[in-house]
Image: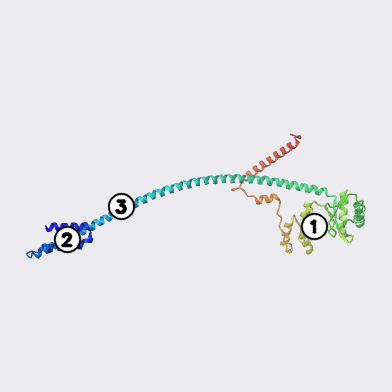
Amino acid sequence: MRDDRINNLISQDFYTGGGQKRKTRGNLQQNLKMDDKPSNENEDASNEASNLAGHIVMEAIQANIISEIQGIRSDMKKELGETVGLLKKELVDFRLEVNQKLNSIGSDLKEVTGRVEETERRVAEMEEWSTEAKQVLSHVLELQENTQAQLTELEARSRRNNIRIHGIAEGAEGDNMEEFLEKFITTELSPLNTTLGLQRCHRSLGPKPPQGSNPRSIVVCFQEYKTKELVLRSAWKKKEIHHGGKRVFFEQDYPPEILRKRKAFSTIRKALKEKGLRFQTLYPAKLRVFFDDGPAIYNNASEAREDLRKRGMDSLDVEVPERGTLATRMKQLSWEIAGGTSRRHREARLMHIQEKLKGFRHRSDTTQELPNGC
């Protein structure tokens, strides 16, 4: 009966938990005391029962702890499983999202690649067209420059019998310019021993300058070139000619293009006069300077300025260098196709361009010959 009561107490301690361990032990000892009222029981049996009860209690506590650990383990396993499942789900969603973005990036990259290829193709076409257009334009500019040079030469030849007279006041000629000039030239440059044979004479074209300004030059055209040269050399030989108290100058009548090129030597001529060096301005626009070691001829002002500075004439004014012709600037400013082109290819392309220009000329001539209304 005592063993059954102990087992009941142990079971009660097992189900109530470790918090009632002391109470169970106290009840057990109290019941043991009630059963041990008879004085004839042996103390050894009591001690043995007490040890047995303690051992059983310890086993019950150990079992309770193991049960608690197993419960905690099962809870942790359950929570870990839920966490792993949630992580797997999030990983799957993340993988799907990454795949979608990669697919979108791939499609965008494909589209960009297509656009880049299209851009490269168009740039290549533009480079080829620009090169051809540059070559055509350079060729046309060269033709235009040659034509302009020929026109300038024709204009200069048409002015070979002309001279310009500077310094005669406005209105000094009166109503008859020809009579005034014949009297002035024969008086100042006598004896000429020839008739002047003036074909026409007039003031240079342009509005009449205001009072006090420099007068317009007088253009004189002779019937014969020899007479014009005789008058001009006589004027240069006399050096100083005056009219109305002012000095008068005689010079050749050049086209504006030649005058512009000759004017570029003005600062150089001034510096040469200061140095006492003899020089000549040659036709159409060249400068000949006589140095101690021999004469030197310069084709343009930049060439003359550079050589004179090398010779020690550092007092020349600094001027903007000549920019060159349009054809030269076109070749300098335009780009070339990457890799360049061979000489044979350039010559073939030039022949193709010339054939195109010939065809254009032929079509233009045909159009001009068509009757009106066609």
Q: How far across and how far down the image is residue 200, in percent?
A: 88, 49
Nearest to the eye among marks 2 and 1: give it: 2
- Gap in Å between the C-alphas at discs 2 and 1? 141 Å
Q: Which mark is residue 55?
A: 2
Q: Are marks 2 and 1 in contact (CB under 8 Å)?
A: no
Q: Residue at x 69, y 45 (%)?
A: 139
Q: Which mark is residue 78?
A: 3
Name the one closer to the observer, 120 or 53.
53
Q: Are marks 1 and 3 in contact (CB under 8 Å)?
A: no
- Gap in Å between the C-alphas at discs 1 and 3? 114 Å
Which amino acid, by three-letter code, is at mark 1? Gln
Q: Which mark is residue 280?
A: 1
Query: In the figure, residue 239 lies in which quadrant?
Result: bottom right
Q: Residue at x 19, y 57 (%)?
A: 12
Instruction: Check the image and report above or below for 374 versus 203.
Output: above
Which amino acid, by three-letter code, is at mark 2? His
Q: How far across and how far down the image is residue 358, in percent?
A: 70, 39
Where the N terminus falls, by quadrant? bottom left
**Color style of the picture:** rainbow
Q: How far across and how far down the image is residue 36, in percent?
A: 10, 63
- Gap in Å between the C-alphas at discs 2 and 3? 34 Å
Q: Residue furthest left?
A: 40
52 vs 262, left or right, is left
Q: Earlier in the sequence, mark 2 or mark 3?
A: 2
Q: Which mark is residue 41?
A: none
Q: Earlier in the sequence, mark 2 or mark 1?
A: 2
Disc 2 on helix, strand or loop? Answer: helix
Name the one closer to the observer, 369 or 259.
369
Q: Earlier in the sequence, mark 1 or mark 3?
A: 3
Q: Residue at x 43, y 48 (%)?
A: 97
Which amino acid, by three-letter code, is at mark 3? Lys
